[in-house]
Amino acid sequence: MPIDHTQVKHIAALARISLTEAETEAFTRQLSDILDQFEILQSLDTTGVSPTAHVAGLDNVLRDDEPADSLPADDTLRNAPRRRGDFFQVRAVLDE
């Protein structure tokens, strides 16, 4: 599906970007090539092919959520640059 300079300029105006003539020419070719690829894809017979959200065929590849003991506070805070009691001490990020 060929696309022309007028359509590319219209798309650029909608996106609120300005294009040089060289950019307009380049985008005209690139968009035409992209649309040609979609035409090829549309011509494929997908009868019997179920729709997919992704091609990997993987479902939720995560470990089981099992409760476990957490790290002791002393181990957690051992390398903290600053601490106050059992807490990390950080600079204030919000005004009072």
Image (spheres, rainbow, N blue to C red):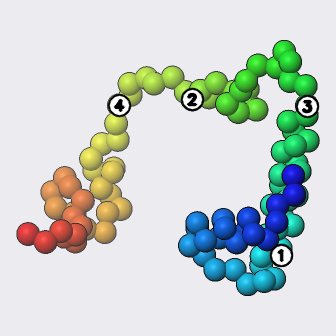
Task: Check disc 3 and report the residue beneath it.
Answer: 44
The residue at which mark 2 appears reads as 62
**Picture quadrant of residue 46:** top right
Left or right, 24 with respect to 15, comes to right
The correct choice, above or below, for 95 with respect to 83 in the image is below
Q: Earlier in the sequence, mark 2 or mark 1?
A: 1
| Mark 4, secondary structure of its residue | loop
Q: Which mark is residue 25?
A: 1
Determine whether label 2 and label 4 are within 8 Å by CB: no
Give the mark nearest the N terminus, 2 or 4. 2
Give neighbour class at mark 3: few <14, some 14-19, many 20+ (Cα, 10 Å).
Answer: few
Instruction: Mark 3 vs mark 1: give the one in front.
Output: 1
> What residue is at 73 percent from the left and 84 percent from the top?
20
Q: Which element carries disc 1, helix, strand or loop?
A: helix
- Nearer to us: label 2 or label 1: 1
Closer to the camera, 13 or 84? 13
**Residue 26: x, y in percent?**
83, 74
The quadrant where residue 15 appears: bottom right
Q: Nearer the viewer, mark 2 or mark 4?
A: 2
- Quadrant including the C terminus: bottom left
Q: Rounded to the nearest whole Å, what is the CA distance between mark 2 and mark 1?
A: 47 Å
Q: Nearer the viewer, residue 37 or 86?
A: 37
